[in-house]
Amino acid sequence: MKKFICTLAIALSLGSMAFAQKSKDIQVAIDLKNVKDDKVMVSITPPAFDTETTTFFIPKIVPGTYSEDNYGKYIEGFKAFDKKGKELTVTRPDENSWKIEGAKKLTKVTYLVNDTYDIENTHDIFSPAGTNILADKNFVVNIHGFIGYFENKGETPYTVTISHPSNLWGATSLIDTDASNEVDVFTSPRYPDLVDHPIMYTKPDYTTFKVDDMDILIAVYSPTGKITAKMLTPEMETMMRAQKKFLGPINSTKKYSVLIYLTDGTPDDAHGYGALEHTTSTTVVMPEDYPLDQLKSTLKDVVSHEFFHIVTPLSVHSKEIHYFNYNTPKMSEHLWMYEGVTEYFANLFQVNQGLITEDEFYQRMSEKIAQSKGFDDTMNFTNMSKNILLKPYKDAYYNVYLKGALIAMCIDIQMRESSNGQKGILTLMRDLSKEYGSNKPFNDEDLFATITRLTYPEVGEFLKKYVAGTTPIPYDQYFAKMGVTKTTIKTPGNPFLKDGQIPMVTINPAKEIVILPTVTPNAFMTNLGLRNSDVILGVNGKAYNLDNIYDLLGASEGWKEGDAITVKIRRDSKEQEIKGTVKLPVEETEGFHATESAKNKLKEAWLKG
């Protein structure tokens, strides 16, 4: 039966190609069953062309990454055929495009796709934006890595047929119109919408629940089965219910999928931890060996950020986003909004809904202030956004999550002050979504004027001076508007990083992790009797070295005071195990605290309104 279904699916796929010239859509066939040399075959049949040549593109860049990743590098064996199966002449102007001669005769193109996860040491593609081909176990199908588009055909509908092993299930927000357990058929009205819907094929491990009128899907791939969707769902459901309550009527998404890929920590697996937003889903990459509590906490912060992208750039975005050019992109000026407002909401909703305390919220914002000062604080943020693919601006990209969120916070504070607590930045985003909406993009140069019209003159002045200008933001003054003033706070530190960023360990020629001989051991080290120049070979039964040092740093973020711990070290050429408990170093940092009771009502409107 399996062979029959497979053969039938291929026959149907090829049959549709034979009559493709009668179809107005672009038909795609992806074969996940017959994987050879870690490569997947893709066949694409376009509608008829009225030009002598056409060009097929695989994206150079995709929305949400803000980096040139050149996915065409992972395509090989590209061929173009006429209806008799004769090859047409193809040239390759660059690594992301193929020029096809005799386009009027074109019936089909075929090519092989290599994945990016197992060669991450050779490129800088962010793992959640990458692809995975693990035959019979897992496929991360970020569409932009598998399917391209023809010149001037980006607005043409797509029909995608994917044949896959019967034991794998495709988690996605797309609707499968084929009842077979080995063939999925998806349709999309245009290429940007298709790219916006990733699919993860794996052994079924998922949960579903409903939040108001939104269907939520949580799908997990865990290489050892250690982590399941059921383990993660309670916290995810609590978080998403809080987000929906926070957003109110601004959101109209009917389905949202969270695709979670957990890595095994080996060199040939994904190592870029985080997530990539999509309109109705997000792809997440995290290490499987994170302590469960830490994994849940990290997912709460990461997924909540991506979920809030349904506000912007989904509901509110510029023409540069709406008509995104995947190969010669023109970037928008407003990363402060797309990423900054989103990141701010991901923190604000947690204090608003009681998931974190007021002081924890202040601490998060003060950490962003401290980190953002590591970048050029006079850099024009709109200019940076517009030129984010170029130096020196692309080196400041991470600041959109720091200063971008702080810009949003200051706008929120200013609106609360100007409206006597009645309106904030969520009000602004609701109004902007009504003004524009998902199908009505704005002109980049018009946004500030629109925001000023919808809010207050003070907000317009802020945007001109601090976002489109070069003046550093006086955060103390904005906090003071809410009765919040600067103070010194004590926070738990990282066992291996002083002040959260200065390494206390290094790597020796054997690629082993070594405690620096010059540092003063912190409380974590002295409590366990660790010494300068000790070689750290493993922790809690897991070996660590240069290849997975970031996994160690990540895992240590989840350690709690008093946790049992075993550290395997080598000292003076002798290996030994040290057993004890975790004692976290305490660091004094600059923070904020509410001190003016006279402004308490305004502050409550800001944080709880």
Image: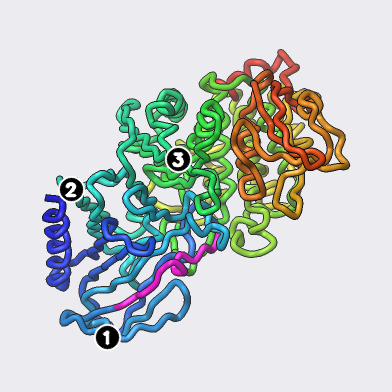
Residue occupying image coordinates x 30% and y 65%: 41
**Does dot 3 land on a helix, a strand or a loop?**
helix
**Above or below 590: residue 354:** above
**In 3D space, how far apart are the residues under numbered discs 1 and 2 (Cα atoms)?**
34 Å
Q: From the viewer's perspective, tell me whether residue 556 is left or right of residue 59.
A: right
Residue indicated by mark 3: 311
Crowding near the residue tagged with mark 1, few <14, some 14–19, many ≥20 C-alpha atoms within 10 Å: some
Residue bearing the label numbered 2 = 177
Magenta residues (range) = 67-79
**Outermost residue toward the top?**
597
Does any portion of residue 431 appear in the rendered image? no
Disc 2 residue type (three-letter): Thr
Q: Residue at x 66, y 43 (%)?
A: 403
Per the image, the residue denoted by label 1 is: 102
Quarter of the image for residue 132 reads bottom left
Instruction: Label 1, secondary structure: give it.
Output: loop
